Amino acid sequence: MGIRLEDHLDADHLAVLKAIPGDLLDLSDVAEARARWAGHMALAPAPEIDDSIEITDHHTLTGDGHRLLVRVYRRKQRRPDSPGLYSIHGGGMVLGNVAMNDARCAAIAQHLDIVVASVDYRLAPEFPYPTPLEDCYRGLVWLFEQAEAFGLNPARIAVGGGSAGGGLAAGLALLARDRNEISPCFQLLTFPMIDDRNQTPSSHMVDDPRIWSRSANIAGWSAYLEGRNGADDVPAYAAPARATDLAGLPPAIVTVGSLDIFVDEDIAYAQALLRAGVQCELHVYPGAFHGSNFSVPNSDISQRWNRDERAALDRALNS
């Protein structure tokens, strides 16, 4: 049974929710949704990037010849043998680009003195599974290959992302473990999109097109899996909640709001990691909806959330 979000929000979150266009995440037409999303993002203030950060664009070829963009953020004055974070943007597998996380990636690079690389993977439905995941894998392999050039310590490279990016990061950790070519050391999973089946109680909780909702989630999974979402043969690399063997994965932090449709699947995944012997830290933030740590950045909840994630990254990469 769904809830009315307005009845569960503090003043900061309510003000932001009311300012979001009523059909922002209506995915009944993906092309129109992308145009709405781009228009909404264009209204936001330009991201503030500290002058101490250098941003450079690089490219690597995928197996099918695509020229894949990886954007790198690092301090101009930086230490040698730096840790790194490989970041994957969100957007429900159908929206978004590398630029949407410029401010976040730059801030992490600045505050933690690490190298952050962000991948511009191809989107569904034009490029369904496995292309987005394989793009992410190729970009990560490239980062390991370029470790010496970027002054990176290859033993201290984490993977992370939010929403679809969190799901891709979780799938990437599984893929890296099983291919045994590269070894990320940590997973930063921010409200990860990991279960195509949409059967948990929380998956029915929100159907408000201003934020990521049940309808949007079904549409995103359908685009990514070419309408096979919910089928018995969906692989765990595509939907990590389906994984039956999580042993040997890198430690993780899983963060999610209590009003997020992903809260049940994310809690279950954190518990499954723990049962598999994987160190995992879980945070559920009361009164937070999907993405509100980004869209309501000045609220007490969001500030605590972002501090928790940076602290976990700091422990994993700088300790």
Image (cartoon, rainbow, N blue to C red):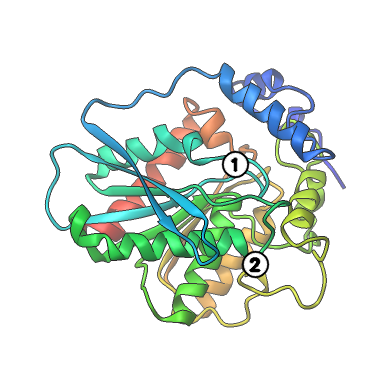
In the image, residue 116 lies at what x, y percent?
A: 33, 48
In the shown orientation, is residue 32 left or right of residue 146? right
Q: Could you say which disc has been placed on residue 286 in the image?
A: 1
Instruction: Inspect the image, locate mark 2, and give the three-letter code of the amino acid beneath it.
Output: Ala
Q: Nearer the viewer, residue 105 or 281?
A: 105
Q: Residue at x 21, y 53 (%)?
A: 150
On screen, residue 187 above or below 304: below
Q: Nearer the viewer, residue 258 or 108?
A: 108
Q: Could you say which disc has been placed on residue 238 in the image?
A: 2
Q: Quadrant of residue 211?
A: top right
Residue 94 seen by the camera: yes
Q: Are marks 1 and 2 in contact (CB under 8 Å)?
A: no
Nearest to the eye among marks 1 and 2: give it.
2
Q: Residue at x 83, y 61 (%)?
A: 227
In the image, residue 309 lies at what x, y percent?
A: 41, 48
On screen, residue 172 above or below 86: below
In the image, residue 73 lies at what x, y percent?
A: 31, 41
Q: Quadrant of residue 252?
A: bottom left
Q: Could you say which disc has been placed on residue 196 in the image?
A: none
In the shown orientation, is residue 254 left or right of residue 37? left
Q: Residue at x 79, y 28 (%)?
A: 23
Instruction: Inspect the image, locate mark 1, and give the three-letter code of the amino acid beneath it.
Output: Pro
Tell which circle, 1 or 2, labels the residue nearer the N-terminal end: 2
Could you tell me which secondary element the residue under label 1 belongs to?
A: loop
Q: Quadrant of residue 240?
A: bottom right
On screen, residue 244 above or below 118: below
Q: Quadrant of the C terminus?
A: bottom left
